[in-house]
Image: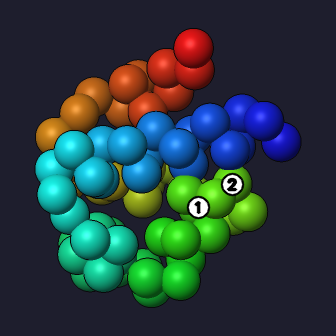
Amino acid sequence: MARLENLGQNIKKYRLKNKYSQEFLAEKCDLSREYISRIESGQKYVSLKKMFLMADTLHVPVKDLFDFD
């Protein structure tokens, strides 16, 4: 479960770095704000297709979302 939480934290980190709201990211990825919230808190999985879309929207390579220090 820790990896899923780390992934969510990285998504949130890059979302905030870009000054995007959960609503904005949700709209760009065709997801609900609640689903974005659950992804960021490590409660929900995200499909690979949506992962690529999120990375593009956040202007980061997908591999950066999986950089767990």
> From the viewer's perspective, is residue 67 above or below residue 65?
above
**Towards the viewer: 69 or 47:** 69
**Towards the viewer: 13 or 58:** 13
- Which residue is under mark 2? 42
> From the viewer's perspective, is residue 44 above or below residue 34?
above
> From the viewer's perspective, is residue 62 above or below residue 50?
above
Instruction: Locate the C terminus and report the quarter of the image it occupies.
Output: top right
Q: Quadrant of residue 47?
A: bottom right
**Towards the viewer: 49 or 40:** 40
Q: What SS does tag 2 mark?
A: loop
Q: Quadrant of residue 20?
A: bottom left
How far apart are the two marked residues, 1 and 2, measured between alpha carbons? Answer: 5 Å
Q: Residues within 10 Å of mark 1 (few under 14, many from 20)?
A: many
Residue 43 is left or right of residue 69, and the answer is right
Tell me which residue sits at (37%, 32%) in the image: 62
Task: Give the total of numbered labels.
Answer: 2
Instruction: Locate the N terminus and report the quarter of the image it occupies.
Output: top right
Q: Are marks 1 and 2 in contact (CB under 8 Å)?
A: yes
Residue 68 is left or right of residue 29, and the answer is right
Give the residue type that dot 1 points to: Ile
Residue 9 is left or right of residue 43, and the answer is left
Image coords of residue 11 (percent x, y) = 42, 47
Tell me which residue sits at (41%, 23%) in the image: 63
Give the residue type that dot 2 points to: Gly
Which mark is on residue 19? none
Q: What SS does tag 1 mark?
A: helix
> From the viewer's perspective, is residue 67 above or below residue 47?
above
- Which residue is under mark 1? 39
